[in-house]
Amino acid sequence: MRYVVTGADGFIASHLVDALLAAGHEVVALCRRRSRRDLANLVSPRDGQTIVWGDVCHLDTMAEIHGPIEGIYHLAAPVDVAESLRLGVDDGYFYDQIVHGTENMIEVADRLKTRLFFMSSSEVYGTPTRTPIREDDAPNPQSPYAIAKLDAEARVVRYARRGGEAVIARAFNSYGPRQTDRAITGKACRWAAERPSEPMPCGRVDTSRDWTYVDDTVEGLRAVMDRGWNGEVYNLGTGIKHTVLDVIELAGVTPMQLQDGEQWRGRAEVVVLQAERAKSFGALGWVPQVSLPDGIQRTVRWWREYLEGQ
């Protein structure tokens, strides 16, 4: 089968491309050109993979995508929540990239008569009133990033209701090889590989997340695409929460908490995210396989190998 993956050179998307190719599928990998890259996530050239350079917000890029296509995995989006907070709601960058990019992918899916998968985020829930969080719990987006994701979700659902084929995944915090050190998991694992005897500066360490190893996340994405009910939203999380401090200590790093840290986030800081997993486990048969201690150690080893190769 032939699939489109947008944002294909990103952290999660590049692992998805690997998995699809390993399963014998062909992949049209839509990538956005950058002036610099921290990690080269896609191997190219390789059999079954076609690179399309462009931007989901540009219609000329969309015109380069032709059928037959079995499905579109739409993962392209700016992902830095902190950056969206710095820019603020009025800036519009995150909204344009996420919402308008999704509108364009809806048009492509409709033109090709294929199923659209939209990658949303657990950030749309904000700090919940209860945990674990169910898919039908009221959203409470606390950043421009989360607001844009929720708006894009609504457009995907409307498309499904008017006859299109579309599904949505709200992925909880994924981590693993290739994740940059902008994320706390990537930062802690790189620190453990690079300078394990030094304390690591960090902000808040008491917030909790539902950490999911990237290979498990990818299997969840494929399960949603293949078996998800049309127009439905699925949580992709383990159902287990751990603090940021847990992650840092599992990596073998000593935290050095800064007094100001990232406290500037104030009310925008999401305090806890934990998935109710019954819907994705039951309807999709998706069960994460990698525990947090194992996944963190795998990621530390990857960073060691990556840094040795530089």
Image: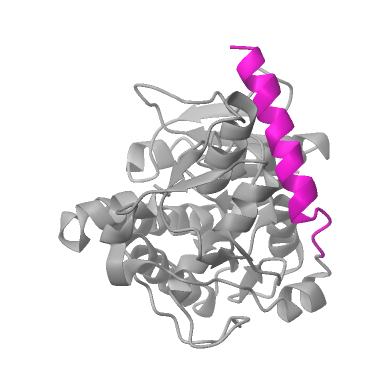
Name the residue at 43% across, 57% down. Answer: 107
Magenta highlight: main SS: helix
Q: Nearer the viewer, residue 27 or 249?
A: 249
Q: Nearer the viewer, residue 33 or 180?
A: 180
Name the residue at 50% across, 54% down. Answer: 111
Residue 240 within the segment the image draws in magenta? no
Is there any visible trace of residue 110 in the rendered image?
yes
Left or right placement of residue 215 versus residue 56 in this view: right
Residue 304 within the segment the image draws in magenta? yes
Residue 286, how many percent across, how many down? 80, 65
Residue 177, how many percent across, how many down? 66, 36
Name the residue at 52% across, 50% down. Answer: 75
Left or right placement of residue 21 versus residue 270 in this view: right
In the rendered structure, which segment of residues is drawn in magenta? 287-310
Left or right placement of residue 216 versus residue 245 in this view: right
User: Measured along the vertical axis of the image, is residue 206 above or below residue 202?
Assistant: below
Is there any visible trace of residue 113 in the rendered image?
no
Question: How many numbered circles does the render carry?
Answer: 0
The quadrant of the image that shows the N terminus is top right
Residue 183, how many percent across, how many down? 49, 45
